[in-house]
Amino acid sequence: MYQVLARKWRPTTFEELVGQPHIARILTNAIQSDRIAHAYIFAGLRGTGKTSAARILARCLNCEKGPTPTPCNECVPCTEIAESRALDVLEIDAASRTGVDDIRELQEVIAYPPVRDRYKLLIIDEAHMLSKAAFNALLKTLEEPPPRVVFLLATTEIQKLLPTILSRCQVLEYRRVTVKDVAGHLRRLCDAEGVTISDPSLHRIARAGEGSVRDSLSVLERVLASCGNDVADEDVLRVLGAVQSQVLLDSIGALARRDVSALLGVLDALMDEGHDLVHFWGEWIGVLRDVMMLRAAPDRAGLVSRAEEETKALLEAAEPLSSEDLARAFQLLAELEYPLKSSAHPRFLFEACMIRLGSLGAVRPIEDVLAGLGAPGTAPPAQKKTLDADPARRAPAPGPAPAVDNRPAPRPAVPAPAAAPPSAGAPAPAARPVGNNFHALLLSEVQRQKPMLGAILESASRIVHAEGTLTVELPAERVMLRRQLEREENKNLLAECAAPLTGGERPQRVKIEVETTAADAAEEREAAAPAPRDGRGDAPDRRKLIEMARKDPGVAKLLHEFGAQIVEIKPLELAVPGNDSIQDAPEERE
């Protein structure tokens, strides 16, 4: 009678266990040193050899040449155990015998010594299915069993076993078998069976088994039933319902080109061929994962369970994508899993995800962006020049009695050395002579030591050193950069860079100032005026709202890291003590 591969090729010795060398070593040492425990728990994924190891251990203990770690598999005890008809080896399915009466029946059986063999072994499969009462009935027997009795409990869900059961047994945990080990086992089996099949197809079958040797053998059985002993790669893909590697490569290429039409075309072709979208989702997110792993650890190719040719093709197709692009695409696909499995229209969700993936903009690290802002000493951006040249920009804001600004216009970005403009009623301090181009020299030195700070300092309209104070003045439209310059580490760096330019004297103080325009003065007067009241007579305290926003941890981090400023407060539903509704707050200048 024909036997399926999973039964025909079941391991008969510890050496034949696939992917479980630690289990074989523990049990072999226990037999050789005569330290056989009275109860074992074999826990692990389905199809990893738990029940097979229990039967091998039974043959090792009851073999006519034993106890031995290498049973002969020819004597009467070994033969009867292999055929599941040995009187002293009882195998029970706990999934169908879960009650306390079944356990009491077992206790009556084990009360008698072995009929013929050395040991009486009780193999309880799916032990986690026993009821709590059955476990409690088994406790005393597990703690003090009769002599020459060994309990072997196999389970796929060890967390469901009672702690009192675990404490009375030796727990051996089975590992998920790697794709490489499963594929090697399948290759040996196919060679013995006379089956012609390629290594990539065996790797695909091993991946379909998801770490279970028995599941992989079942998949191979299905492939052989469909294709016979001469298996082509296309046959394996058809039987498994898998997606061809070229389709995955086309998908990655379309994502790299941001080609939404090509992505939707791939999805439409798969639907026409009758593929399952959930399966395609798993294939695609697995490809993205593999590319990310190869990018992050190029020296750890073993982390990816793909053939070398397929791996190389994937890396070439994903070359235009940065690590940030791959991470964002992976995140979008990961968020699609639950909706895809529960929606009545999974295709619509997948199409929307494809459109989002194809519309993603390229991401560059902020360090690269700041490094490309320009070399030290270059002119300010054209946008700044346009704003400064616009007469309407510098005109006073409309309002009563506009203030007259009699101060000189701002100086160029890289001015000649000059003293700071005198303040009203006080003579200007004499600037220390530090060379002919202090501004440009300091900017160049800061750019060399810290490019990000140098890019910020390029926006300064004036940099002078006078009486031990280094003053950096920013234009009004660059007020958001003030927080960055006022950070303590940035001030210290400015002082250290200025020391060689001031004759070796390190500035005692670094001062950051912002130009004040007539429009700013008008805004301050407007802010000081009484706030308009709503229909119920409540006046929103705008400055209090802004202060509350600044104390928010997320807002505070943005203000600190990026030199941002609070422009307005939204939404209107934001609750403030004493106010039921608020209006948008105007722009608040630092």
Image: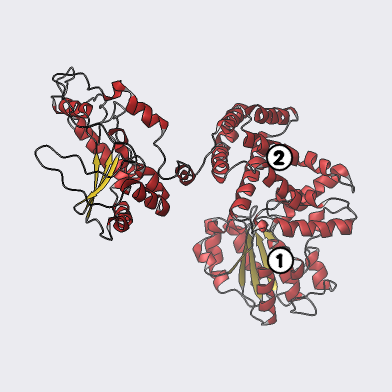
Asked which quadrant contains residue 159, the reply is: bottom right
Q: Secondary structure at mark 1?
A: helix
- Decide which of 227, 426 is in the foreground and name it: 426
Q: In this view of the protein, which residue sits in the foreground, 540 or 22?
A: 540
Residue at 27% over, 56% down: 502
Give the percent coordinates (x, y) of residue 61: 73, 75
The quadrant of the rendering that contains the C terminus is: top left
Upstream in the sequence, badge 2 or badge 1? 1
Q: Nearer the viewer, residue 42 or 133?
A: 42
Mark 2 or mark 1, which is nearer to you?
A: 2
Residue at the spot x=66%, y=77% of the render?
Answer: 30
Q: Which mark is residue 249?
A: 2
* Number of residue marks: 2
Q: CA distance from mark 2 to mark 1?
A: 42 Å
Please name the residue shown 75% across and 30% down the image.
Answer: 273
Q: Where's residue 588, x and y in %?
A: 25, 32
The numbered disc on residue 505 is none
Residue 241 appears in the rendering: no
Viewer-proximal residue among 17 and 353: 353
